[in-house]
Amino acid sequence: MNKQWEKLNPGILKLELFCKGMRIDPTCDLEKDARLVSRIRAGLGSGLEIILPDNLYANIPVLEEFAKQSPFLLIKRSSRYYITKEGSDLCQVTIPSQPLWYQKRTSNGTLMSRVGMLQGTYLAIYPARVCSYWLSEPRQNCRFCATGLNVGVTEEAEKSVQDVVETAVAARKESRITFVHFNTGYCERKALDILAPYVKAVKEETGLLIGVQCPPQKELSKYDMMMEMGTDHFSFCFEFFNKEVFREVCPGKAETLGQETFFTAMEYTVGKMGKGKVSGEIIAGLEPIEDTLKAIDYITSIGAFPTICIFRPLAGTDYQTKPSPKFEDMLLIFRHMYEACKKNSIPTDIAPKIRVSLVVLPYEGRYFMEGYGFDDFIYSCKLTLMRLLFRTYYGIKLFLK
Ligand code: SF4
């Protein structure tokens, strides 16, 4: 291996690529070699899926304006793909190919890629109709979001339980997924009731791990129902800790829910499920850094893990002309994420074979360590032990299914 590549930190490269995007050289043949670049759900997965060194999945912005100025360039040479920066090779990367099941149809005749798509190594599905904030007059959608531009256009407007189960079965068989992630936008107070039959059916038919992400509900008993049906993970997108920014960027959430509803649901589900199974999702790059750091401290202090999305000014959204965040600022935030997870002993990367391309998750925190002390060693030993126990248990359960 090239000496330069040995020194490369793939986690930091992933972060920089998220902030700066990447240009595509004409030598690349992505139509043939890559997964479909398609905007689904809120749009964060609208980039090019690649695998960086160390098996690090990343969904890189390539379509947005800022990506056209990127110092990074993807090139193809002798059938291999490389990322270059200012004319020098940085590393070889893998372009995951399109799964064959994308082109298959369910028994209802629906194209499976319009039911769900892979994001990293898990199946992402938005089963309900478009978020109500996009339909209100005036629109109250979160300003960074593209759901209203995607649902019903690049994916089916509504998916039947049968379509979803068949797509999950195909993805499990052919792509060996272990996790299905469901999300919805705002559906008044019905999101969990809408998702329940999908969760139940997919769990019963496949035994896969299931995550649910939708605006929080005040009736907390609904979360107990979802756990009984087989939900293994909840995530809550409160987006911003800063109250003014929350109100300005997420007018619908601010008016109908308020931050407190998110916090209550998060604390309730952590209390029921235990540490490391619930996530608080925030966006870095639109609120002052100190508020993002406070959000990380809050999330980890209650036993949840932070999912930090780097703001992406998606084409067509209200915020398409905003600048992409500065890499140096993001580095600070992700270093803090690792330290906060370690301080609060948050379990990360426990479930098997889940690689996430849209965000840098706490399981990638080791790339942001500054030095390696005794506390890092203890934290890493704890995680290794937990992984071993859970993966053995899950492997046996799936085998018996
Ligand atoms: S709640 Fe906000 S981010 Fe989620 S789908 Fe609706 S507008 Fe988009």
Image (tube, grey):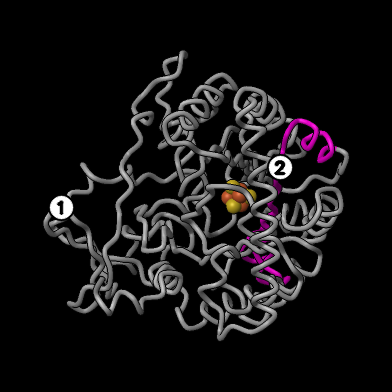
Q: Nearer the viewer, residue 126 or 132?
A: 126
The percent position of residue 300, horizontal first and vertical second, equals 74, 68
Residue 260 in view here = yes
Q: Residue at x 70, y 56 (%)?
A: 386
Q: Amino acid at mark 1?
A: Ser
Q: Which mark is residue 79?
A: 1
Q: Is residue 295 above or below residue 227?
A: below
Q: Is residue 339 above or below residue 280?
A: below
> Disc 2 marks which residue?
232
Does the magenta segment cover residue 316?
no
Q: Secondary structure at mark 1?
A: loop
Quadrant of the rendered structure where residue 50 is?
A: bottom left
Q: Amino acid at mark 2?
A: Asp
The magenta segment is 222-251
Viewed as shown, does residue 149 lie left or right of 6? right
Q: Residue at x 66, y 64 (%)?
A: 306
Q: Is mark 2 within 8 Å of ligand 1?
A: no
